[in-house]
Amino acid sequence: MASWAPVYPAAVPIPVDLFVSKKHPGLNGDLGFADSLGNIVFKVNFDKSTKSSPKRVLLDASGNPLISVFRDDEGSWQGFKGGGYRENDLIFRVKRTVKKLTRTELEVFLVGEISGESTPDFKVKGFPFQRSCTIYRGDSIVAQTSLMYKLHQICARRSKFRLTIFPGSVDHSLIASLIVQLLLSTGNTASSMDSDA
């Protein structure tokens, strides 16, 4: 009789959940992305010092700038590495393709990718008011957001929601900056995150 040994599957990457809110401890009103233990992974600074082109800066937990997003003269957005906006630090361009009362769609073009400007590297589709969106790379889902319903709860608060990033080679800071961009591309401001409606 042949001996039997258990076969264990290879280590399978699992999705990462981040919880997005302005009410995480120690944020002083900034928007934050926390892990399941409540540790801040990313936070967002809303710099309104320039009215014509407000800047949103994604920071790491220590406050170091990772990605800065500016609105350009054509109504699109550009993401730069770090806290500045030098042309050689340009990471991505975002163009809004659908803006309806409840639905928004964005196309994201990575700088330096082979696909060029005609084919987006990512598509972001969602409903900012409901804190619901999906990020696609081709036909694959890269990340999704959803409200956090509790058992027997009819309405969920919009001031905190879940971002699930699926396994792959996409930088989590890029995903976080795209989520912020979708939420604010509809003309919402940082204060909209305070609403529980």
Image (cartoon, rainbow, N blue to C red):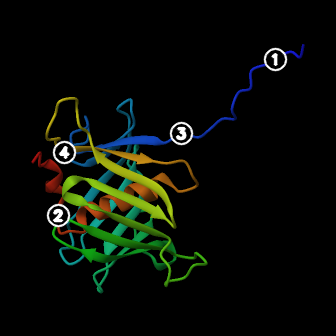
* Label annotation for residue 4: 1
Q: Pointer 1: residues within 10 angstroms few (<14), some, or many (20+)? A: few
Residue denoted by label 2:
188
Does label 4 or label 3 sit earlier along the sequence? 3
Could you tell me residue 196's position as x and y percent? 11, 45
Instruction: Find numbered disc 3 in the image and state the secondary structure of the residue it sits on.
Output: loop
Could you tell me residue 41's position as x and y percent? 40, 43
How far separated are the C-alphas under marks 3 and 1?
A: 28 Å
Does label 1 or label 2 sit earlier along the sequence? 1
Residue denoted by label 4:
159
Kind of residue indicated by mark 3: Ile
How far separated are the C-alphas under marks 4 and 1?
A: 52 Å
In the rendered image of this protein, does residue 50 appear above or below residue 37? below
Could you tell me residue 28's position as x and y percent? 21, 43
How far separated are the C-alphas under marks 3 and 2?
A: 32 Å
In the rendered image of this protein, does residue 175 appear above or below residue 156? below
Kind of residue indicated by mark 4: Ser
Instruction: Find numbered disc 1 in the image and state the secondary structure of the residue it sits on.
Output: loop
Q: Nearer the viewer, mark 4 or mark 3?
A: 3
Instruction: Find numbered disc 4 in the image and state the secondary structure of the residue it sits on.
Output: loop
Quadrant including the N terminus: top right
Q: Residue at x 47, y 52 (%)?
A: 172
Residue denoted by label 3:
14
